[in-house]
Amino acid sequence: MKLAVVLATVLASLACAPSQAKPPAGGAGVFSPAPSPAPTLDAAIRHSVDLGPADSATVVSLSFGLNVRDPQRLAQLIASGRTVSPEAYAAEFGPDPVAVQAAVASLQGEGFRASWRPGSSLIAADGPAPLAAALLHIAIDSFRLPDGTTFYAALAEPQIPAQLARLASNVSGLDNYRRAHSRAVRRGGLTPTDVLAFYNLKPLRQAGLDGTGQTIVLPEIDDLPNLSDLNKFAQEFGLPPFDSILTVKRDPNWGTPLKPQGETVLDLEIIHEIAPGAKLVVYLSAPDFGHGDRAFDQMVTDHLGSIISESLGACEPDTPSGHRNTYASIQDRAVAQGMSHFVATGDNGAYTCGEDQGPAGSFPATLPTVTAVGGTTVFESEQGVYFKESAWGGPIEESGSGGGPSRFYALPAYQKSISQALGHGFRQVPDVSADADPATGFHIVFQGKDGQAGGTSASTPLWAATIALINQDLKKKGLREVGFANPALYWMGENSSRLPAKPFHDITTGNNLAYNAGPGWDFATGWGSMDAAALDAAWILYIKGGGG
C-alpha cells in the first residue's frame, strides 16, 4: 500500500516586487532547483526504522468506497454525454441507504466512529490502528525516517470484512506517509492584464463575461487562514474583494490541512483575475488519501458549482488501488451530474515518480474522466500579446510539464484518433496546457508580499476560470454548460482547420524531459493552450451541432 499526495505547484520566492513586474521574454534569471519527488512508500519503509505495530494512540481514518448500482448503465450514461441531477443519480446509481446504514451500525458496534451522508459514495470510519488492523486482517506498523519523521502504513492488501463486502470493494486511508512541498523561484510574474491579453480572454471580458452565475469548487490541502493576501491582490489589480464570493469549507472528518503553502492562494488569485464574478468554494482536507477522498466526495455531493479546479496529484504507480478506484467512482458521479473537472499533471516533467523510476504520470490527471492540464513556457510580443509558447521542461531543475501514458487506464474513445505508439493503448495526458514555467509565471500575493508562481497548478485554474466564462456565455445563449470537456476539446482539435478560428495554440517546440512537443496533439502539451475567444466560439458550434 503506497501513498503520495503532492501540491502540483511551483511557488515564488516572496521578496517584495513591483506590482507590474514582468519576467523578460524567455524567462532569464537564476532559479532554485525544483526538488525531486519524495521517495515511494516502499522506498521510505526500506529506509525507515520499523517501530512495530501502531498503537491505540494512532487514529486511522478509513474511507470505504461504496459500489455503484448498475455500473454498466452508468458507463453508458457517461459515454452518451447525457447528465442527470444529483437526486436522479442517487436514485438510479447510488447505494441502498438501508444497507449502508446497517453497515455503519456494524462498524460503530466494532468501536469505530463511522458515518455516511445521503448522496455520498463513502462510509467514513475512524478508529485506533489496532482496531483497523483487526477489521481488515492486516498489520499496520509505525515507522521513523532518518530525519525523525514518523508515519504509519499497512503492510499488506486489506481484506474487506463480509458485513461491508457487498457494499464496498475499496478502502483508502491505510497510511499517512506523503506530504506536500513548495518550490522557490524568482519574483515578478504575468499580471492579470498580461494574462487576459496573452490568451485572448479580453474579448470575452469586454462582452460582459466575468463568471457571474458560475461557481468553481477546489479541493485543497493547505490552509487559508484569512483573506488578507487575496484582497491585497484584488486591490492591486482593481478586482472585486473576495469577501462575498469565497466560501471555505472545513470538517473534522476531513482531517487537518497543512499550514499555508501558497497553493490555495495561487489557485484563487488566478481564477479571480480571469473570472472575477465567479463564486469560489474551497474544500480543505488533510494531505492523505483517506481524508482527501472524504472531502472530494462531499464536494461532489454538495454540487455547489459545475467546475472543479484541482492542483493535487500523486505518482500514479505509487497510488494505492483503493484510493484510485474510490476516487474514480466519485468522479464518475461528477461527470454524470455535468461537472467539468480540470486536474494538474504535475511539475517534474514526465518523471512524476522521480527520474530513477522512469516516466510515469500523475493521478488523478491520468483518469479518462478528467481534463488533464499540462504546462508551457510563454513568450510575449513587444505589444504584450501572444507571440509563442514552448513545452515547459527544465532539465537542470528536473522540472517540467507532466505528461505521458497511464499505466492503468485504457485509451478512451475520444483519444482514438490521436493514439500514439508510445502510449501502448493507454490513456494519454495532458489534454491541454497553458503557462506553467516559473520563469514566465504569474504574479501573486502571499504572506503579504508580491511574488511569482508557476507550475501546472497555475495552468489548471487558468483553464477552469476560462470555462466559467464560456459556461456563462453558453447559458446566456440558452445552451447547455460544458460539462465533461474532453469530447468537445478533441472534436475541436481534430476539426481545428475547419473552424472559423483555431481554438488552440499548437505548441511544436520544447519537451517535458521525455516527450517532445510537435504538430497536433502531443505528450508534452496535449492540444496546446487556448485562444479563449476562439474556444468560446468553437464550443457554441459544437453544442449547436449536437455535440455531446
Image (tube, rainbow, N blue to C red):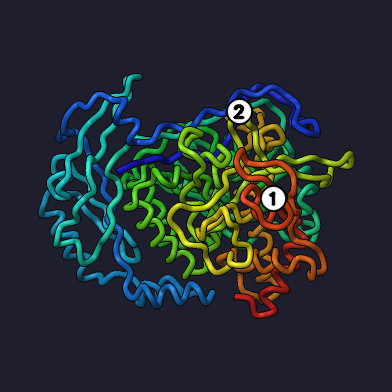
Is residue 23 in view from this perspective? yes
Answer with the quarter of the image where residue 233 lies: top right
Q: CA distance from mark 1 to mark 2?
A: 30 Å
Other-residue count near label 2 (Cα within 10 Å), few / some / many at <14 / 14–19 / ≥20: some
Left or right: 53 as drawn, with respect to 414: left
Q: What residue does disc 2 label?
A: 397
**Number of other residues with Cα within 10 Å of mark 1, as a class: few under 14, some 14 to 19, many 20 or more:** many
Tell which circle, 1 or 2, labels the residue nearer the N-terminal end. Answer: 1
Q: Which residue shows up at 49% across the image and 53% down it?
A: 406
Secondary structure category for the residue under label 1: helix
- Residue 365: % across, % down: 51, 52
- Vertical position of residue 272 compared to residue 481: above or below: above
User: As rendered, which of 548 and 49 lies closer to the eye?
Assistant: 49
Residue 103 at x, y percent in the picture: 18, 62
Amino acid, disc 2: Glu
Mark 2 element type: loop
Q: Which mark is residue 283?
A: none
On screen, 386 above or below 232? below
Decide if residue 441 is on the left or right side of residue 293: right
Residue identifier under label 1 = 274
- Residue at 51% across, 36% down: 226
Q: Position of residue 397 (x, y in %)?
A: 61, 28
Q: Seen from this angle, which residue lies furthest top?
A: 147
Locate residue 183 relative to residue 170 in the image: left or right. Answer: right
Where residue 405 appears, as percent x and y from the top left, is: 53, 52
Q: Tell me the residue at 86%/41% (across/down).
A: 381
Q: Which quadrant is the N terminus positioned in?
A: top left
As drawn, which residue projects farthest toward the front?
A: 421
